[in-house]
Every structure is written in structure tokens, then in C-alpha cells.
Image (cartoon, rainbow, N blue to C red):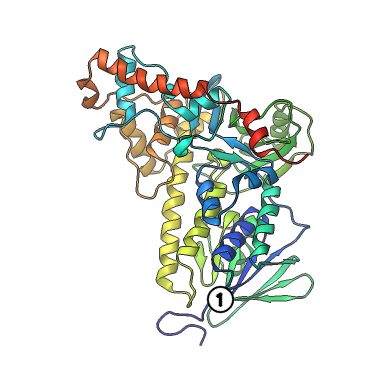
Amino acid sequence: MENGSNGMGKPIRRVVIAGGGTAGWMAAACISKVLGKRLDIKLVESDEIGTVGVGEATIPTLLNFHNLLEINEQEFMAETKATFKLGISFENWRNVNEDYIHSFGLTGTDHWTAGFQHFWHKGRERGLAGDYGDYCLELRASQENKFAHLPRNGMNYAYHLDASAYARYLRKFSERFGVQRIEGKIVDVSTSALSGQVRSITLDSGVDIEGDLFIDCTGFRALLIGQAMGVGYENWSHWLFNDSAAALQTSSVRGAIPLTRSIAHPFGWQWRIPLQHRVGNGIVFSSRYVEEGAAIQTLLGNIEGEALMKPRVIRFTPGQRREIWKNNVVAVGLSSGFLEPIESTSIHLIQRSIIRLMQMFPTSGIVPSDVAEFNRQAWEEVEKIRDFIILHYKVNNRIDAPYWKDARDMEVPASLQHRIDLFRETGRVFRIANELFAENSWVQVMLGQGIMPYRHHQSADLMGDEELTHFLGSIKGQIDRTVAGLPSHQAYVERYCSAPK
């Protein structure tokens, strides 16, 4: 029997990763580093199949992944031509010509009864406080185009990186731990009539690759989880209108800034990601509101430098697989679902799936309760991220285009509406357990999109004007002094991790 009565299957010894790219090679790197001595790990990919390549901006959680793998940061950054990232600049999102930054790190100092935003709100009412961002080190450093590593991890940061170079870097890393790469296109998937599990995948060369556990990194095609396992897809396009993207690369015309730029247009938004050797560009749009040709022309009309390629169009459906792990197939990356890259969460979700799999790795056989728990955690995590992304569209003051009016008028998930109402009415934000985005992220985006709370916590009223002025001024003063002593971001990158010419 392929499955015993106690739910235990056969021991997992052979792992097959179907597909390369960022998802495939991140999976290979982590599994081989931790369990490579006990497993036979094969990765199948085709040089003829391109990767989506839009996941070039990251969030600080990637540092944790690299620490687990003991990756040398300077070596990694040089090989991937990476730069540092302190946040995302949202331009024209709240309204045309109104911008804000969602930065990493913390803003101000919280009291145990209330977040810093309550004291800032009181200071604004009394004319004693500057912009909310004045009290965040990462935001102020990004405005001044500065960066440095600070003692005790005093500056929170992430990376802009070349996705193709990152996959190559992780391939070399993985092969040192025994991963075998096999070139070929997957043309068939063989499953067991008895258990429903995948037995093997067949390549265009006629070779069959057998395995005990299969990691589906085949992108939007979802050859294993979708086609072979028949797992359905939850479509979220009624909340997230965008269904297309066009990407291209341009030459650099200025020093790299430590910000991802997100520039809103009447039918979507555009990204700019500065690397050491080029700039990644793209436009994310809804085909319901603009024709593809017009979207591409808007992108071409809003780039700097020489275009190094023709725009490459990507079609997608925002949403999530109803199961991420089914039988002996685990979906990682785009095969599991897609949330547009507005908050740079694509690589994070790859990382989370891999780490969750490692924590529940079925060494002695696949256990149904593990599979159920894996799927429950994955769904809860992505739903919270989904709500955070919808927030950017729901809360806006733009009256120039139907796209933005329809987004403002749509009914959003009750979980998100509660957060919006709570902040608007009380200024409070409560982080849910294991949620990616911290309270400060929600505050920055809700304030940035135009929600000003009606009231603040009474703890702030216990401070008189003189005490409140000193409290706010000491935070801002310390940040100003720190930023003044930082080198420019470009100079720091050149000194710390310059890529070989």
C-alpha cells in the first residue's frame, strides 16, 4: 500500500523541484542546505522557458532567509548587482501629485497603552509635530538618499536585486550541497490511481524523473498543483482589478536610490527598481480599463535611460490556490497564487512556503494533519497580505479616472473594512498573530492614503505642550543627527558590494 492506515506514507528520500527561477532555486538552496545529506534532490528546468522576472524588490524578511542559509551579504549583493532598499515611494496614489513613503522600521516611540501615532496626532492638533515620517529613521534616510549598516541592526533594510542573477547565485549555492539540475521541459505528469500522488514527471527528452515529494515551481502554468492535482483557484479580481503587467529594463542615468518607486497612473501603476547596473521598470494595469498598447506607451513615456529590451507582457489572475499542498505536491511561488508586486511580497511568500515546509518536512511520510496545518497557515498569511494590498486601492481621493473611483466604491473584505473603520475612528491598529505587516506599516499606508483618525488615545492628553514638544523633538533630533552622519547610498554600495565590471 502507498499509504498506511495510520496516515503515514512512505519515507521521503527523493525530492523533485519542477521549475527553476527564484522559487525553484530558493527551495533548492534551503532544502539542500538543511537536509541535503539525507535527500536526493533534483531540479528540472528549461533554458527555453523564461521566468517572470518582476520579483526584483524585496522586504527585510529576506535577510532572515539568508541568515538561515549563512549567505555572505557582500558576495550575494555583488553577484546579483543589488542595492539597498529602505521602503517604497507611493506617488500619485492618494491623489495626483500627492506622495508618501511606506518605509521599513518603526516610527517614533510607542507607549504601552497606545502607539506613537496617538502622540503624533495630538502634536499635529497642537501645531507641535512635523510630518509623521519625520520620526522614522529609514524614511528620513531614504528621503536624503543615504544608507549605512548601523550598530545593533539599527537600520531596517531589504534589497533590490537582479532576479535572474539571484537564481544563478542560488543554483551555485545549491549545487555545492548536492542538488542535481536537469535540463528539459516537462511534457507529462504521471500520478497513481490508488493514492492520487505524483509518481514521476516526463521530460521532452523522454526521460522520466521519479520522486517522493514534488515542489511545483512551474509558475502560472501550475503543471503539478493545478493540472495534475486539479486544485482550484480562488479568484480575487473583484478586489484587485489588475490582470496584466509589462516589464522592461533600462540603462541607469543616475545613482541608485534606496527606494522602490511606485507611480500610479489612471489605470494602474508603474514600478522603478534601481540596481547597480540598470533599472527594472514595469507597469501593472487592468485590461478592463486600458488597452495593452496604451499601457505600454504610458510605460515607455515614463522611463529614464535607454530601453535595453522590448516590453514583455505578463498576464495573471490575482488570487490563491485553494490548497497549496495536496498529496505529495507542494506549490511554491506563482503556482500557488499571485498578489501583484505593489508591496514586494512575492519573494517573501516563496520564502515563507519553503520555511513552513522545512518545519513540517515529511521525513517519515506525509501526514494529513501536517498538510492541513500547512494549508491553513498559508491561507491565513496570504489573506492578511491581500487585505493590506487592497487597502492601497480602496482608500484614495482620485477623481480623474473610473479605475480609481471603482476601487474606492468597491466592497472590501470585512476584515479589512474593520481595520479601516477602527483606525479612522480611534487611531488604533492591532497586529494579528503571525501577520507580515506590522502596525507601523498599516499606519503609514492609511495616513499616506488619506485617513486621518478622528481622535487619539487619552494617554497623549496627559502630556502638556512643553513635554510633548520635548518628546517629539528628541525623537526627531536623534534621527536628524543619525541621517546627517550617513554616507550617500550610491557611495556606500560602491564601497561595500560593488559588482564586478
Q: Is residue 154 above or below residue 175?
A: above
Q: Residue at x 30, y 23 (%)?
A: 119
Closer to the camera in the image, 59 or 189: 59
Within 10 Å of disc 1 (Cα), the crowding (few <14, some 14-19, many 20+) is many
Residue 467: x %, y % from top left: 26, 17
Whether residue 146 is visible to the viewer of this picture, yes or no, is: yes
Instruction: Provide the residue designation for mark 1.
Output: 197
Closer to the camera in the image, 471 or 444: 471
Residue 260: x %, y % from top left: 59, 33
Q: Is residue 305 left or right of residue 320?
A: right
Residue 488: x %, y % from top left: 60, 25
Closer to the camera in the image, 421 or 500: 500
Please state, as top left, top right, bottom left or bottom right, where the C terminus lies in the image: top right
Q: Is residue 25 left or right of residue 328?
A: right
Residue 425: x %, y % from top left: 29, 29
Circle 1 sits in a helix, a strand or a loop, which is it?
loop
Count of residue discs: 1
Q: Is residue 47 above or below residue 257?
A: below
Q: Residue at x 40, y 29 (%)?
A: 107
Q: Quadrant of residue 225?
A: bottom right
Q: Residue at x 53, y 59 (%)?
A: 354
Q: Is residue 7 above or below residue 409?
A: below
Closer to the camera in the image, 139 or 191: 139
Q: Is residue 447 left or right of residue 163?
A: left
Whether residue 398 is visible to the viewer of this picture, yes or no, is: no
Q: Quadrant of residue 307?
A: top right
Question: Farthest residue in the bottom direction?
Answer: 1
What residue type is disc 1 on? Answer: Gln
Q: Quadrant of residue 24?
A: bottom right
Q: Residue at x 66, y 49 (%)?
A: 166
Q: Is residue 490 above or below residue 62?
A: above
